[in-house]
Amino acid sequence: MTRLIMGRLAEALAALLLMSLAIFLLSRVTGDPVALLLGDGATAEDRDLLIAQLRLDRPLWEQYISFLGNALTGDFGQSVAAGRRDALELVLDRLPASLSLAGVALGFTLVTGIAMGVLAAITRGSAVDLLVRIVALLGQSVPAFWLGIVLIYIVAVQWGWLPTSGYGTTAHYILPALTMGTFTLAAVTRLVRASMLDALGSEYIKLARIKGLPEATVILKHALSNSLIPVVTFMGAFFATMITGAVVVETVFAWPGIGRLAYESIVSRDFPVIQTVVLVITASFILANFCVDMLYLAIDPRMRDRG
Amino acid sequence: MTLLSIRNLTVRLGRDALAPTILEEVSLDVMPGETLGLVGESGSGKSTLGMSVLRLTPPRLAEGTSGEILWDGRDILTMRGRDLRALRGAEISMILQDPMASLNPVFSIGSQLTEALRRAGRSDLMQAAEAALAEVRIPSPAERLRSYPHQMSGGMRQRVVSAIGLAQEPRLIICDEPTTALDATIQYQFLELLRALQGAHGMAMLFVTHDFGVVARICDRVAVMYAGRIVETGPVREIFSNPRHPYTRALLAAVPSTSTAPDRLPVIEGAPPSIGNRPGGCAFHPRCPMAGPDCQRQPPMERLAPRHEAACWRAREEAAA
């Protein structure tokens, strides 16, 4: 088991290293950073000076090593647009807002999705099952930006129940979390329904009933514990959907997180900030996947005996 | 004193009276402490019969079930939640066919075993679980309690399933082809174990199988099923020496014998009818060497000797050559 964990850790680090290389190369081919930094009024001398200062006259591999060295010490350069602020600091400032929103959305999604999936599976073929399946299908078909705008229009503007946008109170979380979680909610529901139906038809459920266990124990302990394995498998993908969704949702709801920061810095061609956002998102994605692997080990004893 | 009495049990594929039947008018008694073998080909309805006793058939079959299954004078088919749960495991238990699939992969052996023991009111759960594993002759039972199903072989898992089945000291245990998935040598060991356990616990056993060899080894009495009906019942010795139904005769003739070693394995000509496509009258008549015009009508169950019954118009005749 220790070997398995070490292996996963090594894979995570390798992925991160590979990603840093991709980001470095992309930042070198998507434009001239010198022109961007100097602006229109610069002379050729200013230009040469800056190139030497940024070590852009060195070979590419040397540049990458120094990029990596800087990144390791937390130096991702300065923002071009936001008054030369430190890029990493700018991103880290925005990170808590994004993490709390994604956390709320993921929590709401898992709890509601698992409950709806279990409900649909145990009432298979009934009106409840049909309703859950229709809602799930709609949830996976509706684009987040549209849903966000419609929710703002109806719930916030027409009914006035919740704030239209912004950040601060608990009420501010509801609409963006709903928008962010809907696609995943639908996916979790369908996944849990399908795997619950599988589990409920299995021999070990028969044996649990033969023992005379109460139906609640049969369903919530014996069937659900097995049905959660595929949910855990997909959790990394769900998290990725949420993070990518954050760019849209945070922009629609004026949420001060890294998603909106990504959007703003793309609009203002603020390359150091874009790079940093991408790297932070990648790192959190790799971290999430690592956590999923560890969770897997915790719930499935068959995994613990591998490798 | 009958322990379990099945009366006119009919199981259809759904509520509709015209829906195809899986079991037709099955009546069967199990006496305390006896081992009754239920023999038939796949699709004859023998597993459905076992499942019906514990009300574990899928919803569509449950809807299409009629008749009576009497236990202590109460009809299991009309029991509701709490009574049914009090019956399952504690009064009637079951060993399933596939040991690879019948244990929950995410819980330890100990956890799955103590669930059953807890229901039996045991307080010293871990000790009781260890003793239960020792009784089914699992080596180093204390360590095995912490194992997970995937860490054990098929034979060992089937022993665990048996220990779970016996944990609440049931008066009847239904075995649904428990040896089919096991290797031949393991099969033999497992049957010996079952017989020893039955003797020690004094319970009755309903043994569902397609294998007359297994019947000879373990059963006191046997009921032969064909196309959803019981066609012959009697003491094992009597059925082996004097089978009266042509189907029973054909089944016995199809058991390969090690002493004669034929070039070709004997078979019953034709195939068993599929559900919903059963011939009228005696369902066996299209394959029967003795069939005549009267076989278009369903023969009644007829008593041929005090404990020997068969449903065949030709039951009193000798076999056709």
Image: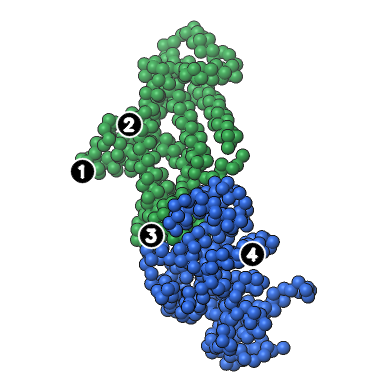
Chain colours: A green, B blue
Task: Give the residue at mark 2.
Answer: A255
* Depth check, front residue: B158 or A273: B158
Residues beneath discs 1 and 4 located on the same chain: no
- Measuring from the top left, give residue A222's x and y in whole percent: 46, 53
Q: Which mark is residue B192?
A: 4
Q: Nearer the viewer, mark 3 or mark 4?
A: 4
Crowd rating for badge 2 (residues with CA inside 10 Å; few <14, some 14–19, many 20+)? many
Q: Earlier in the sequence, mark 1 or mark 3?
A: 3
Foreground disc of the pair 1, 4: 4
Under mark 4, the amino acid is: Glu
User: What's the amino acid at mark 3?
Assistant: Thr
Distance from Cα at disc 2 to Cα at disc 1: 21 Å
User: Which of the numbered marks, if any, corresponds to residue A159?
Assistant: 1
As measured in the structure, the alpha-carbon distance from the residue carrying label 2 to the one carrying label 4 is 71 Å
Circle 2: element type:
loop
Tell me the SS state at disc 4. Answer: helix
Compared across the picture, whether A78 is left or right of A24 comes to left
> Residue under mark 2: which chain is it in?
A
| Dot 1 amino acid type | Trp
The image quarter in which residue A36 lies? top left
Separation of marks 3 and 4 at Cα, in angstroms: 43 Å
Q: Is residue A192 left or right of residue B35?
A: left
- The residue identified by callout 3 is A123
Q: Are marks 2 and 3 on the same chain?
A: yes
Picture quarter with the N terminus of chain A: top right
Residue type indicated by callout 2: Trp
Chain bearing mark 4: B
Of circles 2 and 4, which is in front? 4
* Residue with the most extreme top position: A45
Residues at marks 2 and 3, CA–CA distance in whole angstroms: 39 Å
